[in-house]
């Protein structure tokens, strides 16, 4: 029979299908299996309306066979088959889908889940095949036909022989090259892996050859002998776990699915099983891990959920349906309502995706809120693993919604040293307390040593410990919680004062003299020197004013060493401390020594604030000289 040319844009369009639309060669098997599944759906649907079809759902299936010697891979089904006209229309016209036309003829109640909407999936097989033959016999027909093509140069259709109704797609694989090993698609292991990856939840059995070593008949316990046995077995599980009612799925089944699907052999912290109907119908199976993925904080980490359309995997990681705030969640979404592009690899960004993402975000948030409210110990375990992720999301995202995560944050607190939420902190605040107080430092012990903490403790005001660099960025990002502003203990204005002692004009004059001397000695190293309103037992402390904090300065110094970003330095002095009197006395008797005292006090204030002096050697020399 004479070769026919494709009715679309022939070579150029087919080259586009093979080389541009699909980015991974292995998906060709998914496409061929999906077409076979569509054909099975059509025959099953026909059996419901035509008693002459004479087939039950249990009779239907797909078989994959490989012939390594001849480099032939065959996918067979006993679906509806195609007539000569259908072969001409479906395979002779690229980008025309018989499945789509079939679905358009059905009413909405039909139980059919064909996804071959674009008529191009079949041609992905040319990515790995040098020649393809399709032998098919239509339901109710006596004659079979063979469609054959080597690619864009055209195709032929001839009569053929096939005893049963159905279709064989026979792919002769290309020869291997140094870069491309097409023969891997003939291996049992590769076939089984691809079926499980892409088509594990096709509703019909997909059978393929499986080989394993079994003990020989007649071997004994003392002398066991084994032989390689190959047999056809079902490769797919068919019934998705997420399609079963939650009440019928055991915890062990969830855990096994999680381990097998995501390669994490720890038990997930939480399982969220969703079934949503409405504007968009979808099911989701979500897992909150109990341990941090090894690459979670690496730049190459990719968030996302696996995406299925009627049980066929479309994407391994779809980031659009998982919010950044919950990027640690693993799982999958399956929806019949997704709008796919013609390659079925990339989702069209549309309203359906946004609806799914919003629903998933709300459900994850609800689950975490419930855990925090009712299972505090479990929530603290979760927070110990993923709390930092929530903090970084607040700090890095300028979407106002991110600040809503503040309710999920936990901080160590001076109140019995326990973790507390911001809501719990505000609820415990005395009526007269104006701010949510926090202190930054590398550890709780170092923070407790801050001079500024004394006044808060005397007032009975609780203090949050910010021991991670991101904490203060969050405080500034959130700004206020339940109308209470955040205020660092290093701020020069805490909104509270120590008890004032009566100070005469003469005392004020003497104090100002010391302050002016210290400011003149330190020069541009400090912005101001002031009499402190919050120091008690300490002689000095260092505050950062209302702008950048010392912790932010340290962060930017590490991230951008050449930036010279620097917080203001305000040296606060305690006029009631004996050191202040000694300094004032020394100013009169030995101004040079008094200047050394001033510099030593400044370095001590830096060290207590967690800052290194500009010149440790000069500080050491001053101590030596005084000793």
Image: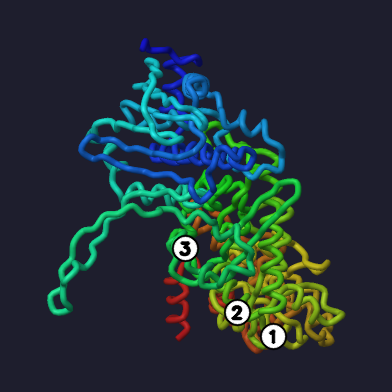
- Can residue 513 be seen? no
| Front-most of residues 17 and 336 | 336
- What x and y, as percent, mark residue 2? 37, 10
228 left or right of 142 in image: left
Q: Are marks 1 and 3 in contact (CB under 8 Å)?
A: no
Give the CA separation, mark 3 to mark 2.
31 Å
Give the CA separation, mark 1 to mark 3.
33 Å
**Element at label 3:** loop
- What x and y, as percent, mark residue 549? 64, 64
Ranked by sequence position, the earlier of labels 3 and 2 is: 3
Residue under numbered circle 1: 415
Ranked by sequence position, the earlier of labels 2 and 1 is: 1
Q: Are marks 2 and 1 in contact (CB under 8 Å)?
A: no
**Element at label 1:** loop
Q: Residues within 10 Å of mark 1 (few under 14, many from 20)?
A: some
Q: Residues within 10 Å of mark 3 (few under 14, many from 20)?
A: few
Of the 4 image quadrants, the one containing the C terminus is: bottom left
| Front-most of residues 476 and 607 | 476
Q: Are marks 3 and 2 in contact (CB under 8 Å)?
A: no
- What x and y, as percent, mark residue 296? 49, 59
Residue under numbered circle 3: 293
Vertical placement of 594 versus 283: above or below? below
For image coordinates 44% across by 17% down, the residue present is 12
- What x and y, as percent, mark residue 561? 48, 54
Vertical placement of 540 versus 362: above or below? below
Residue under numbered circle 2: 447
- Can residue 395 be seen? yes
Q: Residue furthest right?
A: 431
Q: Residue furthest left?
A: 223
For image coordinates 70% across by 55% down, the residue present is 276
Residue 405 in which image quadrant: bottom right
| Front-most of residues 201 and 595 | 201
């Amino acid at each position: 029979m004479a070769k026919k040319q494709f009715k679309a844009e022939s070579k150029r369009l087919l080259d586009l299908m093979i080389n541009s639309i699909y980015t991974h060669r292995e998906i060709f098997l998914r496409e061929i299996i999906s077409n076979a599944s569509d054909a099975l759906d059509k025959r099953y649907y026909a059996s419901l309306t035509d008693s002459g079809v004479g087939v039950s759902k249990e009779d239907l299936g797909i078989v994959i066979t490989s012939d390594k010697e001849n480099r032939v891979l065959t996918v067979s089904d006993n679906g509806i088959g195609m007539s000569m006209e259908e072969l001409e229309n479906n395979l002779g016209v690229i980008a025309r889908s018989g499945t789509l036309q079939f679905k358009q003829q059905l009413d909405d109640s039909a139980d059919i889940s064909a996804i071959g909407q674009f008529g191009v999936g079949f041609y992905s097989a040319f990515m790995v095949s040098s020649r393809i033959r399709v032998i098919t016999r239509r339901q109710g027909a006596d004659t079979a036909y063979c469609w054959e093509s080597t690619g864009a140069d055209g195709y032929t259709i001839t009569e053929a022989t096939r005893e049963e109704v159905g279709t064989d797609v026979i792919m002769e694989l290309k020869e291997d090259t140094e870069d491309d090993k097409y023969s891997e698609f003939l291996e049992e292991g590769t076939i089984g892996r691809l079926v499980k990856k892409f088509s594990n939840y096709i509703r019909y059995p997909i059978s393929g050859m499986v080989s394993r070593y079994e003990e020989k008949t007649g071997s004994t316990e003392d002398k066991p002998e084994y032989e390689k046995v190959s047999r056809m077995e079902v490769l797919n599980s068919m019934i998705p776990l997420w399609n079963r009612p939650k009440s019928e799925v055991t915890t062990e089944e969830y855990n096994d699915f999680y381990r097998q699907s995501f390669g994490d052999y720890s038990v997930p912290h939480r399982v969220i099983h969703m079934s949503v109907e409405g504007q968009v119908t979808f099911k989701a199976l979500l897992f909150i891990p109990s341990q941090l993925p090894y690459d979670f904080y690496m730049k190459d980490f990719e968030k996302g959920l696996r995406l299925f359309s009627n049980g066929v995997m479309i994407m391994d990681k779809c980031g659009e349906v998982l919010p950044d705030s919950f990027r640690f969640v693993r799982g999958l979404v399956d929806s019949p309502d997704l709008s796919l592009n013609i390659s079925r690899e990339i989702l069209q960004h549309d309203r359906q995706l946004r609806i799914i993402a919003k629903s998933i975000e709300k459900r994850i948030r609800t689950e975490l809120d419930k855990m925090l409210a009712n299972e505090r110990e479990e929530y603290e375990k979760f927070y110990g693993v993923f709390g930092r992720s929530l903090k970084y999301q607040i700090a890095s995202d300028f979407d106002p919604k991110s600040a809503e995560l503040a309710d999920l944050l936990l901080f160590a607190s001076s109140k019995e040293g326990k973790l507390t939420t911001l809501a719990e902190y505000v609820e415990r605040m005395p009526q007269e307390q104006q701010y949510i107080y926090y202190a930054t430092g590398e550890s709780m012990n170092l923070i407790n040593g801050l001079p500024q903490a004394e006044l808060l403790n005397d007032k009975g005001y609780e203090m949050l410990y910010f021991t991670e660099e991101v904490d203060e960025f969050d405080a500034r990002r959130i700004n206020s919680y339940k109308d209470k502003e955040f205020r660092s203990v290093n701020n020069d204005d805490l909104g509270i004062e120590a008890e004032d002692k009566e100070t005469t004009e003469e005392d004020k004059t003497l104090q100002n003299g010391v302050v002016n001397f210290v400011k003149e000695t330190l020069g541009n190293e400090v912005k101001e020197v002031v009499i402190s309103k919050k120091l008690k037992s300490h002689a000095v402390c260092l505050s950062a004013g209302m702008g950048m904090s010392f912790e932010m300065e340290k962060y930017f110094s590490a991230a951008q060493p050449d930036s010279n970003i620097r917080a203001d330095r305000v040296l606060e002095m305690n006029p009631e401390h004996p050191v202040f009197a000694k300094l004032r006395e020394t100013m009169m008797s030995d101004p040079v020594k008094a200047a050394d005292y001033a510099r030593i006090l400044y370095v001590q204030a830096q060290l207590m604030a967690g800052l290194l002096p500009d010149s440790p050697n000069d500080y050491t020399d001053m101590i030596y000289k005084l000793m």
